[in-house]
Amino acid sequence: MSAPRIGLKAVAIEAGVSPATVSRVLNDPANVRAATRLRVERAIRALGYQPSRVARRLRAQARPGKLIGLVVPDIQNPFYVEVVRGVEDQALAQECGLLMCNFGQDEKKEHFCLDIMRYESVDGLIVAPAHPRDRKVLELAQSGLPIVCVDRGLEGVDVDVVVVDNREGARTAVEHLIKVGHRRIAYVAGLPQIPSTMERLQGYEDALAAAGIERDEALVRFGDSKHESGRRLAGELLDMPDPPTALFTGNNLITLGALETIHGRGLRIPDDVAIVGFDDMYWAISLNPPLTAVSQPGHEIGRRAADLLFQRIADPGRPTAKVVLKTALQVRRSCGFVQRTVPEIGGK
């Protein structure tokens, strides 16, 4: 068995500095004090540390010291594809190399991805943490690595974060379903440990409360944020003795799963059941009927996150920033807005 590879963190511990300082010595030594640089160089020689060949190759194509990492939960989700595009566009504009990992909503895989980022000595990291108390991301943030969180933040440490107003977006969607006549509305949710899932639940509850509709616990179902759980949970809801007349789905993969169930049963949208999804998709207009959905600016999220990361790398001591972007409800025919009479909100 080969010996474990010496990483940046081990060098930092040996030299008594942060991993970010070791990275600067490797990539921009002119901006590091001579005494600190000598300590790091001695530690590198003592431990036999060798920088990643991949990182060196990418840096050779970029400006010195410019390699950032991006870790996303599910590259199958079109929302994250847009986030990746935003980060990539900004990285290219900065002549910066980009390493990306996808962990598929699996925390163990996420930790593996984060180890890759650490071993490749990225200068900064953009990540959607598996949950707010993600130990691995917290450790990296506390080590001094510049980090920006997207879609969800961290508890216990101040980092830059770019999110959308999930609560308001969900409230607007459910409020619209109520306005077009629905009172038995289900929420098909994602992973409960993800902050956006619970923020969207709050928005769902806000809309029901404002309309005087008592929440039915049986109409809220949590899954794993993937297509299969959307398919399964939609089936469970539609099998109820008194099924919902409308589904509010928590992300676009859940929406696709719910649509598969609805169409598989030969139900008509919106006559038999209406549906509104969180996350608009560029092909939503091509569905039959076109999907009503909450759009969030994925590309802008990625672009703003990359901007914040470059600012953090250049100025590690600046105050942290939280950017909250707006959502927009794209009203189309899947919610039944044409067919149904709009009742007075709060009426019986």
Image: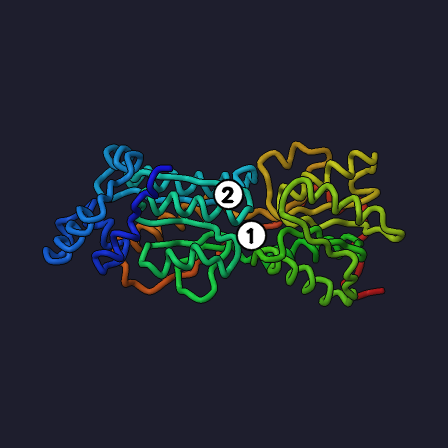
Residue 285 spot, x, y in % from top left = 64, 35
Badge 2: how crowded within 10 Å, few (<14), some, or many (20+)?
some
Whether pointer 2 and pointer 1 mark residues with C-beta atoms closer than 8 Å, the reply is no
Q: Which of the marked residues, 2 or 1, is nearer the chain's N terminus? A: 2
| Amino acid type assigned to the residue bearing label 1 in the image | Thr
Looking at this view, name the residue that lies furthest to the left: 34
Q: Residue at x 74, y 49 (%)?
A: 247
Q: Label 2's element? A: loop
Q: Position of residue 60 (x, y in %)?
A: 23, 34
- The reply to whether residue 22 is visible in this rendering is yes
What is the secondary structure assignment of the residue under circle 1?
loop
* The C terminus lies in quadrant: bottom right
Quarter placement of the N terminus: top left
Residue 333 visible to the viewer: no
Residue 7 lies, in percent from the top left, at 30, 47
Of residues 219 and 346, which is closer to you in this image?
219
Which quadrant of the figure has residue 160?
Answer: bottom left
Task: Tell me which residue sits at (64%, 61%) in the image.
Answer: 203
Question: What colour-coding does the image apply?
Answer: rainbow
* 299 over 14 or under it: above or below: above
In the picture, the disc for residue 103 is 2
Side of 282 where 27 appears, left or right: left
Residue at horizontal 33%, vertical 49%? 124
328 vs 110, left or right, is right
Which residue is identified by label 1?
A: 327
Name the mark on residue 227.
none
Residue at point 36%, 61% (across, down): 142
Left or right relative to 188: residue 301: left
Labels 2, 1: front one? 2
**Percent x, y of residue 158:** 40, 64
